[in-house]
Amino acid sequence: MPTPHNSANKGDIAKTVLMPGDPLRAEFIAKTYLTNPVCYNKVRGMLGFTGTYKGVPVSVQGSGMGIPSIGIYSWELFNEYDVENIIRVGTAGAIADNVNLREIIIAQSASTNSNYGSQFGLPGIYAPTASWKLLSAAVKTAEAKGSVYHCGNILSSDTFYDDSDSLGKWAKMGVLAIEMESAALYMNAARAGKNALCVLTVSDCPLKGLSTTAEERQTSFREMMEIALETAVEMAE
Ligand code: HPA
């Protein structure tokens, strides 16, 4: 059944979905990496495609920016479309001193300044965590490829433009990088009893005032995609 945000029918979407923020990036990924990609959603321009990679059915669905947006799309994939695994692929701003431009981050956990988790009514602070089976498969692939990667805690922030000057405090707690979606994805996966992971490339270092060029982003993008796609293949085995 279609939802208010997705015109796909049950069965149109694969068990494993790659999720970039940008819907045009979803189209690029589908057309570059998948065999016979078919577009299943154009509602609000939030494109989604299903094809195969190395013979394994894989979908690619845009999430939009921020926790409310990925909260909607990932909830529907898990709960309305029987999706088992969502792998977010995106960019992040590195805040740890030892994390540099173009490197890969595999998000073991996602701290947040968002109130998204309050809906679960927990009497404490929940720690949104990646699924071990996706995390371990991604780390194995990154090792095999010889990628420069960091595995650890990230920050999913509600703000891109932020007045609080708090990034240094998160960095002091060992947080590697900032992005805007993963905590909601991890919480939705946990609540649905499903699996989620986030693989990122470092596009900028906000504390150092550095950012990558479009050309540099292409190379690290390819590395991130290969890690995510190989992880998707492992899930079918
Ligand atoms: N802040 C938030 N999200 C981001 C950033 C950032 O600096 N870089 C890439 N995604």
Image (cartoon, rainbow, N blue to C red):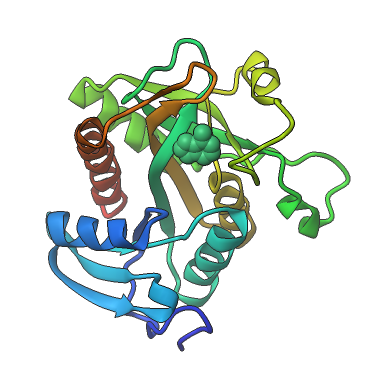
91 left or right of 178? left
167 left or right of 16? right
**Residue at the spot 71% in from the left edge and 47% down from the top edge:** 114
Q: Quadrant of residue 160?
A: top right
Residue 165 visible, this angle: yes
**Residue at the spot 39% in from the left edge and 62% down from the top edge:** 62
Q: Quadrant of residue 104?
A: top left
Residue furthest to the top: 98
Residue 49 in percent (x, y) is at: 27, 70
Report the front residue among 50 and 205: 205
**Residue at the spot 53% in from the left edge and 84% down from the top edge:** 4
Answer above or below: position of 52 versus 107: below
Residue 58 visible, this angle: no
Residue 35 in percent (x, y) is at: 11, 64
Residue furthest to the right: 123
Answer above or below: position of 229 versus 71: above
